[in-house]
Image (tube, rainbow, N blue to C red):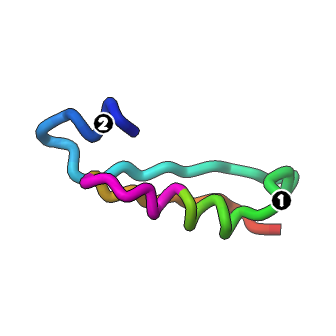
Amino acid sequence: MGTYEMHPECKILVCFVYDPEGRIGNPVGIERDLESHGGKLKVCVIIAPKS
């Protein structure tokens, strides 16, 4: 995220993770953790589908 945060025109970073096999055990927790990183760049994380 640091590289994007330094770019003057980048205001939001959107991350999409496609997890059709449900290998991510706690997708909501990971989304929440990444979105609350505390930097000035807004981060939106979407993990789908949620099993």
The residue sitting at 58% across, 62% down in the picture is 31
Instruction: Identify the magenta region.
Output: 34-40
Q: Quadrant of residue 28?
A: bottom right
Residue projecting furthest to the top: 3
Tell me if 18 is positioned left or right of 10 in this view. Answer: right
At mark 2, the secondary structure is: helix
Q: Amino acid at mark 1?
A: Gly
Instruction: Indicate which disc residue 9 carries.
Output: none
* Image height of 8 relative to 33, above or below: above
Task: Please tell me whether residue 35 belongs to the stretch shown in magenta.
Answer: yes
Mark 2, Cα crowd under 10 Å, few <14 / some 14-19 / many 20+, is few
Tell me if 24 is positioned left or right of 41 in this view. Answer: right
Task: Please tell me whether residue 11 belongs to the stretch shown in magenta.
Answer: no
Residue projecting furthest to the left: 8
- The quarter of the picture where the N terminus appears is top left
Q: CA distance from mark 1 to mark 2?
A: 27 Å
Instruction: Indicate which disc residue 25 carries.
Output: 1
Please give the residue where the numbered disc 2 appears in the rendered image: 4
Q: How far across and how far down the image is residue 43, in percent?
A: 39, 56
